Image (cartoon, helix red, strand yellow):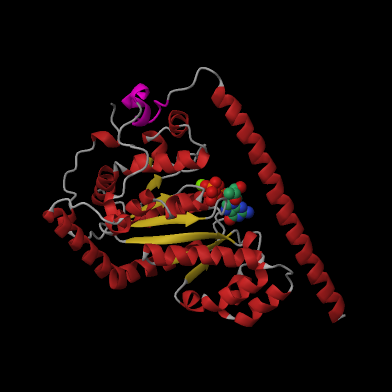
Amino acid sequence: MSAGLEDIKLEALSLSEGIRDSPVCIIVLGMAGSGKTTFTRSLIQHAQQEFNPYVVNLDPACREVPYAAHVDIRDTVNYREVMKQYQLGPNGGIVTALNMFTTKMAQFAELVRRAGERGHKWCIIDTPGQIEVFTWSASGNIITEGLATMFPTIVVYVMDVVRSACPTTFMSNMLYACSILYKTRLPFLVALNKIDLQDCSFVLDWMTDFEIFQEALEQEQSFLSNLTRSMSLTLDTFYENLSTCGVSAKTGVGFAQLLKKILECVTQYEQDYKPVYEKMRKERLAEQAAGPKPADNVEEAGVAVPLGLGLQDPPANSGNSVFLMAPGLVPQSADGDDEQEDMEEDAKGTAEDQNFHSFVQNHLTVQQNKRDKQQQNLK
Ligand SMILES: Nc1nc2c(ncn2[C@@H]2O[C@H](COP(=O)(O)OP(=O)(O)OP(=O)(O)O)[C@@H](O)[C@H]2O)c(=O)[nH]1
Ligand SMILES: [Mg+2]
């Protein structure tokens, strides 16, 4: 096996050492297509000088990323090969690839620790397109908790303001954000993305003034409206604790403000969250000292949750190198399957792009019509 995560010697990484000051881990989460990857690129650019970010891509299924990643899951796990070997669909493939990566969590954390020693003050982590793959899987949990018990860690939730302009979509997005906030127990910043296409002030209005949100809901005739109405009341407390910042990952607008908000979240981690994770770390240490015990209940098993389909052992005919390899050694299939898949994916991508653009276009036209009407009324 060539130099990959497999060969990393665990030098000084130990739970007994306590939480380090750096690097600060910034986990970028958000719904599919919300702009996580573009956001990661912009954040790297804006943070480069001051924070020299160490960059991690955890999306095994992406074609390419618009930034140079120090750690890329695609160098460690061959997602297509995983799908073939385990006969999985795309989402199963992503979950399994992430599970396989997580079996090397200690080595990954060691790389992050070393990056901190080399002067990387931030570690930015881009996550898979399907948000639930990361937020509701054992591996996502292990990665998040593992990082948070070793380094200051925060979550940036990227929200697409164009898609959230519809009140029920906005509410779904907020419910997701809320569940992640309570699940991860980490400082949480919502990046209201794509403000070059749509002003984000409506989100802030909806979050601070229940009546404005109700008015918007009344425009919508849907069975979901009633549910959304009661949900919005429930989420009031959640909104109070939420830090938000409007940005455009595409143009870079808003990032100066975003950096300040990230630093506020880091302070929040130090003050409020670190003691909780310190406690958790000590509990883990005590568990380690006591030795393994059989779990009655999967919930209580913590890190001992089995990582899927017997993943530590690749199938007999796969050869070790298929799953853990150095960059550039990904085997190409001779039968042209991949080309066919690529073409299908291209066609799907183009259709999605067109849908998205016509959605944006429609939205802008509706807005323009509203503005014209208002102006006419004023006259
Ligand atoms: N106009 C505009 N487009 C954006 C912005 N951010 C992202 N996009 C576009 O939104 C689309 C999705 O962006 P990605 O960065 O790939 O989003 P993602 O969340 O990483 O996508 P997945 O990983 O597939 O879930 C791309 O076409 C981007 O160019 C933005 O701030 N403004
Ligand atoms: Mg992405």
Report x, y in % for residue 323. 36, 31
Residue in view at x 86 percent, y 79 percent:
377
Quarter of the figure with residue 10: top left
In the rendered image, residue 319 lying in the magenta stretch gets the answer: yes
The answer to whether residue 53 is visible is no
Quick check: 246 left or right of 302?
right
Looking at the image, the residue that sits furthest to the left is: 289
Q: Position of residue 53 (x, y in %)?
A: 37, 51
Residues drawn in magenta: 316-330
Residue reaching furthest to the front: 296
Seen at 29% across and 73% down, the residue is 271
Left or right: where 374 falls relative to 76: right
Instruction: Say if the magenta span includes residue 188.
Output: no
- The residue drawn where x is 49% and y is 61% is 255
In the image, 113 versus 167, the foreground residue is 167
User: Can you say whether 359 is above or below 170 in the image?
Assistant: above
